[in-house]
Amino acid sequence: MLVAALTAQGFAADTIRSIRAPKDVPVTADPGAAFWKGIPGVTAANDPHGRPVPGMKTEIRSRWTSGYLYLLFVCPYNELSLKPDPRTDVETNHLWNWDTAEAFIGSDFKHINLYKEFEVSPQGEWVDLDIDSTNMGNQNAWKWNSGFQVAAHVDAAAHIWYGAMKIPYHALDPREPKPGLKLRANFYRLQGPAAHRAFISWQPTGKDSYHVPESFGTLELAR
């Protein structure tokens, strides 16, 4: 009989528990803020093939309300690769060419090829995409707009950057959010210049691509 590996918090290693928040707050990337303090997370420390990426142990925390899903990424880095002319007032297509933290989230457990992609950069740039993994050549995927918000800041002394997302829940899931509800999810990072770029994933995909929905874990709404 197979037994799933457990995290230190006692839940399956392929599950992140999103903790219910009493009310909505402005998006913040401060891990010490009252909203995020003490919230348990999961870690992404391996490449897509499951091999450790030294020094890149990334923490992901999540909270939810009736209106939004919140995510926080705590991202150690060696050297940042940043877009030279950042804009945060408009969407940045091809943001994945630079440093990003990414969330892939889907609610359809039958058509698992359908999901949403959200990215935030250390400079607070963002992009969201409506993905069909059977049609990755779709040039219009990034034109979908969830209305999500982001925040980011860099602690250069500690070599850590922080990124947060506040995603309208109904951009993810037509169901009403409630404790016990589950979504399909995976989290990734792209880190560093092209010459020695690191690829970090929460649940290994077994391929060079992040777009492997069969490998997604579970995001569970908790009390």
Image: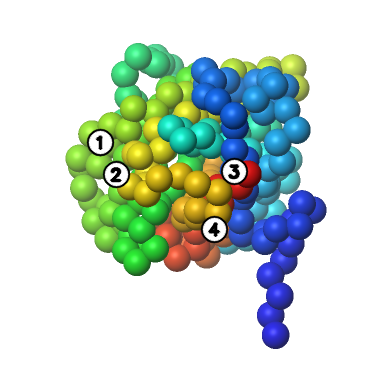
Residue 209 percent across, percent down from the top left: 44, 55
Mark linked to residue 217: 4
CA distance separating discs 2 and 3: 22 Å
Mark linked to residue 152: none
Q: Do the residues under discs 2 and 3 have CB atoms within 8 angstroms?
A: no
Q: Is residue 81 visible?
A: no
User: Foreground: 95 or 62?
Assistant: 62
User: Foreground: 146 or 143?
Assistant: 146
User: Foreground: 185 or 96?
Assistant: 185
Residue 32 percent across, percent down from the top left: 72, 22
Which residue reaches farthest right? 8
- The secondary structure type at the circle numbered 1 is loop
CA distance separating discs 4 and 2: 19 Å
Residue 210 percent across, percent down from the top left: 45, 53
- Of the image marks 2 and 1, the number of the one nearer the N terminus: 2
- Of the image marks 2 and 3, the number of the one nearer the N terminus: 3
Q: Amino acid at mark 2?
A: Asp
Q: Is residue 144 visible?
A: yes
- The secondary structure type at the circle numbered 2 is strand
- Of the image marks 4 and 1, the number of the one nearer the N terminus: 1
Mark linked to residue 18: 3
Q: Do the residues under discs 2 and 1 have CB atoms within 8 angstroms?
A: yes
User: Foreground: 209 or 64?
Assistant: 64
Q: Amino acid at mark 4?
A: Gly
Give the residue at mark 2: 130
Mark linked to residue 144: 1
Residue visible at 75% across and 33% down in the picture = 38
CA distance separating discs 2 and 1: 6 Å
Q: Residues within 10 Å of mark 1 (few under 14, many from 20)?
A: few
Residue 142 percent across, percent down from the top left: 27, 36
